[in-house]
Amino acid sequence: MSARLTLHVQPRAKRTEIAGRHGDALKVRLAAPPVDGAANAELLRFLAERLGVPKSAFRIARGATGRRKTLDVEGLTTAEAVHLLLASAP
């Protein structure tokens, strides 16, 4: 069982948080800058914490260097992952 998440990432935000939907993607604001993989590391740390899975359960399938990313997450369905992330949104 694995989830596929489409994310729109906004680096250099005031804080790391889920900001709701952005078209067909979930918008994630990251406090980290997009330098030397810092934003991707912060994204994986944040999502692992919110979803309750280890960072090793994630794989960036597309968009490692862009704002629009596709992630595969082992151990959850897409519906479960989206529900958990949107439940934590402001």
Image (cartoon, grey):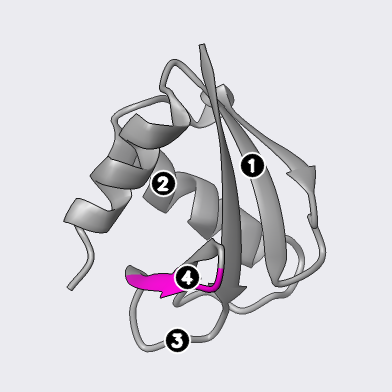
Q: Residue at x 33, y 69 (%)?
A: 17
Which amino acid, by three-letter code, is at mark 4?
Lys
**Sequence-earlier tag: 2 or 1:** 2
Q: Is residue 61 left or right of residue 53?
A: right
Question: Secondary structure beneath disc 1?
Answer: strand
Asked if marks 4 and 1 touch (Cβ < 8 Å), the reply is: no
| Mark 2: secondary structure | helix
**First in sequence: mark 2 vs mark 4:** 4
* Disc 2 target residue: 47
Q: Tell me how far mark 2 sits from mark 1, CA to CA.
A: 10 Å
Q: Which residues are magenta?
A: 19-23
Pointers 2 and 1 in contact (CB under 8 A)? yes
Q: Alpha carbon of mark 1 to alpha carbon of mark 3: how far?
A: 21 Å
- The amino acid beneath tag 2 is Leu
Q: Residue at point 32% right, 36% down? A: 51
Residue 29 shows in the view? no
With respect to residue 88, does 66 lie above or below? below
Callout 1 crowding tier (Cα within 10 Å): few <14, some 14–19, many ≥20? some
- Where is mark 3, residue-wise? 13
Reply yes or no: does residue 21 show up in magenta: yes
Q: Amino acid at mark 1?
A: Leu
Please name the residue that numbered disc 1 is placed on: 71
Q: Residue furthest top?
A: 1
71 is higher (above) or lower (below) than 26: above
Image: 80 above or below 68: above
In whole angstroms, how far apart are the C-alphas of marks 4 and 3?
Answer: 12 Å
* Position in image of residue 24 (x %, y %): 56, 63
Residue 5 in percent (x, y) is at: 56, 44
Q: Is residue 9 left or right of residue 52?
A: right
Secondary structure predominantly adopted by residues drawn in magenta: strand
What secondary structure is found at the residue carrying circle 3?
loop
Instruction: Name the spot of residue 81 as percent of width and height, x first.
Output: 37, 37
